[in-house]
Image (spheres, rainbow, N blue to C red):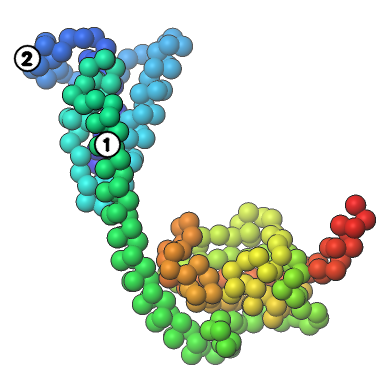
Amino acid sequence: MKKLLQVSLLASAVLVGLSGCKEEQATAPAPAVEAAPELTSFEDKSAYAIGLSMGRYIGSTLEKQQELGVTLNNDIILQGVKDGFTDGGQMSDEEVQSALMAYDEHINGLIETQAKEQAAVTLEEGKTFLEENAKRDGVEVTESGLQYEVLTPAEGDKPAAEDVVTVHYTGTLVDGTQFDSSVERGEPASFPLNQVIPGWTEGVQLMSVGSKYKFVIPAELAYGESGAGTIPGNAVLIFEVELLDIERDDQAEAVAGQE
């Protein structure tokens, strides 16, 4: 998608605004494209970095909002940038604040609507996936709706909800999109089992140290309608989990008492 703001245009606008040659700008023909200036001095490098960062930020932000159906006029944006270098401008500070607040409210409304629409689609996709996955050989379904499959069996004690567990895991969405992986980070995760999503709390209690399970977790046992970060609302989550260690709750209390 073409950027809404080109860095070269933004740089030209800033230079025009600083020169104060507004009348000449209005009557002169469009200037030929000039070669990029050489950035030899500290001041030039700093100035260009500020302009480039601003252009990229504005361009990427408006690019995302254009996907929501909001398209702003580039020329008016550039005029606002130029006017911002002066004491003038067509709007007072109060009008600017009011316009920006209205804009934010409009964008947030569009994002909320889009999220609800996506959540509805994700809900149906999740239901279909759960129904089909439950039919696979080796898949067990608990009373809560949690689905699990033993990939690597092991014997031994199982953790309680109050214990701290150490695991390696990889989490994906039903379309295969990976959203988290301790395996890729190369560092296992440790946490109290009763402080994670319900699907994890229930599922990991089925495991013994050394075992590896695959969990398919319904949205109501994960992040529900709201989602979390890159996880959309109503998303079914798939985790491959290897249980590495269990630290009993009473052991943790004993260690804490010795400190």
Q: Where 106 sits versus 55, above or below?
A: below
Most foreground residue, 58 or 239: 58
**Residue in view at x 50 percent, y 87 percent:** 134
Location of residue 188 with respect to 106 vertically, above or below: below
Q: Position of residue 136 (x, y in %)?
A: 51, 88
Q: Amino acid at mark 2?
A: Thr
Residue 77 drawn at (x, y percent):
22, 31
Q: According to the image, label 1 marks what residue? A: 98
Question: Marks 1 and 2, how far apart in space?
Answer: 33 Å
How busy is the neighbourhood of tag 2: few (under 14 within 10 Å), some, or many (20 plus)? Answer: few
Measured along the vertical axis of the image, is residue 20 above or below residue 165? above
Front residue of 115/66: it is: 115
The residue pinned by badge 2 equals 27
Q: Nearer the viewer, mark 1 or mark 2?
A: 1
Would residue 152 appear left or right of 7 to someone viewing this image?
right
- Which residue lies most toward the right here? 258
| Quarter where residue 117 is shown | bottom left
Does the rendering let one see residue 51? yes
> How many numbered marks does the figure carry?
2
The amino acid type of the residue labelled 1 equals Ser
Q: Quadrant of residue 7?
A: top left
The quadrant holding residue 244 is: bottom right
The x and y percentages for residue 169 are 63, 65
Q: Disc 1 or 2, which lies upstream in sequence?
A: 2
Q: Secondary structure at mark 2?
A: helix
Residue at image coords 72%, 61%: 190
Q: Secondary structure at mark 1?
A: helix
